[in-house]
Amino acid sequence: MPSRKNTGRRRKSIVRRLLMLPLILVIAFLGWNDLRPILNDETVPTYESYTVSRGDVKTSRSFSATLGVRTSETHSNSRQVTSIRKVFVKANQDVKEGDKLLQLETGEVYKAGIDGTVNEIRFDEGDWIWPNVSLIQICDLTNLQVSLTVDEYDITSVSVGEKCTVTIVPLGLTFETEIDHVDRVSSATGTVAYYSVEAALTVPDHVLPGMTASVSIPSEEALDVVTLEMTALSFDEDKKPYVLVKNGEAYEKRMLETGLSDGMKVQIVSGLSEGDVVYRQTGEEKAVEAISLVEIYKRFAGETVVVNDRTQSGRGGRDSRQDGMTPPEGAEVPEGMTPPEGMQSPGEEAQAPSERPERSGEREQPTGGSGNEKAD
C-alpha cells in the first residue's frame, strides 16, 4: 500500500505537469513564426544598417591633363662653322642663372639664363658645329604646368584663379593649385570646340614632364549638412528615394528628400536626423541558415553556464566537500542509506578532526615493531 508521502509526491508531479502545459503552448505559439520558414524551406530577407551623420558634400568636374615644362631655354650656334673648346656642365646637372655652360673656339661663352637642370648636351669638347645648330637645353623641372582642354559646354564655368586639385596618375600624388590661364580662342576645329586651360604646379624631383594627370575643379558644395551613404538608398517605381526604418520587428519604408550628392554620400534635406539608423534589404537567405534550433531554444529557455569548481581537488588534494556538511534543510536520508563520507546526518555532530577516518594512502604503522618486520 503506497505511503502518504509517495501519494503526495505523485500529486505534486501531476500539478506541476498541468502548470507546465500552458507554458509549453505559449512557447510553441511564439516559436511558430521562427519554425514555419524552416519547415516550409522558405527564405528570409537580410538587411544592412547605416547611420545618418553630418558632414560636407562637394561635387567637381574632372578633366584629363598632361604635365609640361613651363620655363626652358635652348642655346644654338648662330654664327660661322666652329668647334667646341670647353664644356663646363654635364647632363642632368642643376645650374643657376649666370653659370657657364660651354665655350666655342671663337671665344664665345654660353651662360644659363634661368635656374634649372641641364636636360640635353648635344656635343662634346672638340666637336665641330654648324650655324643654327642647337647645343644645350636648360629646363626648370621644379615649376611645371598642367595643361588640359575644356569643351565649349564647360568652358564658361572655368575661370582664372579658380581652385583645383591635380592628381599625377602614375604616381598617385595629389597637389592643390589654381587656374592661371584660360585660352578664349578655340584650339581645335570640328563639331565641338575645345579650349586650352593651364595651371602652375610645383613638384618634387620624381615628378617629370609628360606624365598624365587629372584635374578636378569644384562646382558645388553643401557644408555641415545631414548626410547618408548612397548605398543606403532604395528607389520606388517613380525613382523617388527611400530607406527602411525598424519599428519593433518590422521594417517600414520612409520617403526622403535628398540634395547634393558626390556619388559616395548624399545630402538629406528631410526625412532623417543625425544619428538615425536606417536599413536596406541586401538579399535573401534560407531560413535554416538564418535561424537555428539552438538559437530558438536559447531565446526561450536561456543559457545555463555550468562551472566545475575543482578547488582543492586533483592530484594529492582533498575532496571539495567540506567536513561536517549537512544535507539541505528538510532533506531525509532514506532508511538503510548512509550519507556520503564527510557529510553528517541531521542532528549529528561533525566528527572532531582527531576522530575522522584516516585518508586513503595514510596507513598507521603497526604497534610494537618497525615497518620492516615480517609477520611470523
Image (tube, rainbow, N blue to C red):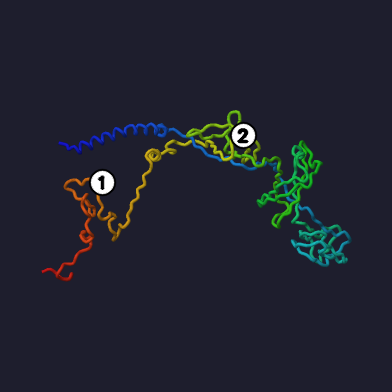
**Element type at marker 1?**
loop
Residue 333 vs residue 37, the one in the foreground: 333
Mark carried by residue 159: none
Q: In the depicted view, which residue is nearer to us: 276 or 119? A: 276
206 or 33, which lies in front? 33
Can you give x and y, in whole percent of width and height, for residue 42 in the image?
44, 32
Q: Residues within 10 Å of mark 1 (few under 14, many from 20)?
A: few
Q: Residue at x 55, y 40 (%)?
A: 50
The residue at which mark 2 appears reads as 270
Image x and y of residue 133, in percent: 83, 58
At 52% from the left and 35% from the top, the residue drawn is 281
The answer to whether 219 appears left or right of 352 in the picture is: right
Point out the frontmost of discs 2 and 1: 1
Q: Is residue 171 above or below residue 250?
A: below
Q: Residue furthest top?
A: 238
Quadrant placement of the N terminus:
top left
Q: Is residue 332 left or right of residue 266?
A: left
Q: Is residue 352 above or below residue 335?
A: below
Residue 188 at x, y percent in the picture: 78, 41
State the residue at coordinates (79%, 46%): 181
Q: In the image, what residue type sits under mark 2?
A: Ser
Say what secondary structure mark 2 lies in. Answer: strand
Left or right placement of residue 265 versus residue 86 in this view: left
Sequence-earlier tag: 2 or 1: 2
Give coordinates of residue 179: x percent, y percent: 76, 46
Image quadrant where one finds the C terminus: bottom left
Quadrant of the image occupied by residue 130? bottom right
Kindly indicate whether the residue at mark 1 contacts the one at mark 2 (C-beta within 8 angstroms): no
Name the residue: 82% across, 57% down: 74
Question: Above or below — where is 130 with respect to 262?
Answer: below
User: What's under tag 1, amino acid-wise?
Assistant: Glu
Residue at the spot of label 1: 329
